[in-house]
Image (spheres, helix red, strand yellow):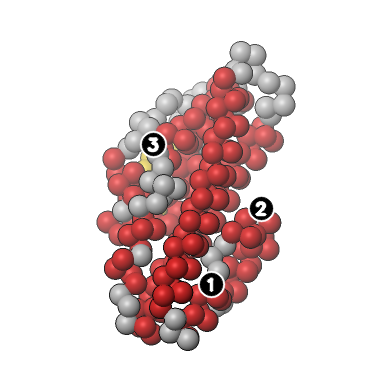
Amino acid sequence: MKFGKEIRRHAETHPRYRNFYLAYKELKGLIKRDERTKLRELLRQQLLKISGYAELQSETIGGEIRYILQKRNPLPLDVTRDRLQTLVEDYMELFEFWNVNQEGFRKICKKIDKKCQDRCSKWFLPMVETCEFRCKDWDLSLLLLGQVHGLVVAPELLEGSLRDEVILIPAQDVMKAKVILGTVCLGPPDPRPETSDALHRNPSRSLFTEIRKVK
């Protein structure tokens, strides 16, 4: 499947993000016409649009989690397993949105490098890697999600169910794995584990990372 069609498929699947995906077709048109100034301007605009909306969504999800933790005694009646599952799905949808757009930026820069001889990858992709959303402390955010899980799911249901197993997770799935693990871990994990955090901030460092799987 061509990447432009993949972006449209994701937009149809995730209506909340529909208007905030990368303008891939428009960028390809500028590349074809070799309009370098407009390309640079549109790339910057697209990064601001995508990272800004992703940051807004992360703050919305995080705000709901912080509200639940502040009202834990007693726990609000509407905080159920279904609501917890919605928070998990919201995070996974957000990470998928970001990953698709990040891959779109990489592909567009590769096309610009080849067609326009502009070395776009050298100056623009570092901007993508260091934007505010990309540099967010996700381990701490997911730690809070795990604390909500501990309030909603009775701890006695998980007693005696833990065993350690080291598994390998593809780099592009690290954040999804963290979301899942954040809702099954009993104890508070290290909010900034060195290996996974380094991989999240620098995915070119390694294709795989070791994490602990809890069953």
Q: Earlier in the sequence, mark 3 or mark 2?
A: 2
- Please give the count of numbered marks on the rendered protein: 3
Tell me where residue 17 sits by quadrant: bottom right
Which residue is at the far top? 73
Q: Nearer the viewer, mark 3 or mark 2?
A: 2
Label 3 CA crowd tier, 10 Å (few <14, some 14–19, many 20+) = few
Task: Identify the mark at residue 16; answer none if there is no mark.
Answer: 2
Could you tell me which secondary element the residue under label 2 belongs to?
A: helix
Nearer-the-camera pick, 49 or 198: 49
Q: Residue 162: x percent and y percent? A: 45, 31
- Label number found at residue 24: 1
User: What separation in Å lies between label 1 and label 3 (alpha carbons)?
Assistant: 43 Å
Q: Is residue 184 visible?
A: no
Other residues around mark 2 within 10 Å, as few (<14) / some (14–19) / many (≥20): few
Amino acid type of the residue that numbered disc 3 sits on in the rendered structure: Asp
* Mark 3 element type: strand
Q: What residue type is disc 1 on?
A: Tyr
Q: Is residue 171 left or right of residue 69?
A: left
For the residue marked with disc 2, what is the amino acid? Arg
**Mark earlier in primary sequence (1, 3):** 1
Q: Is residue 63 left or right of residue 81?
A: left
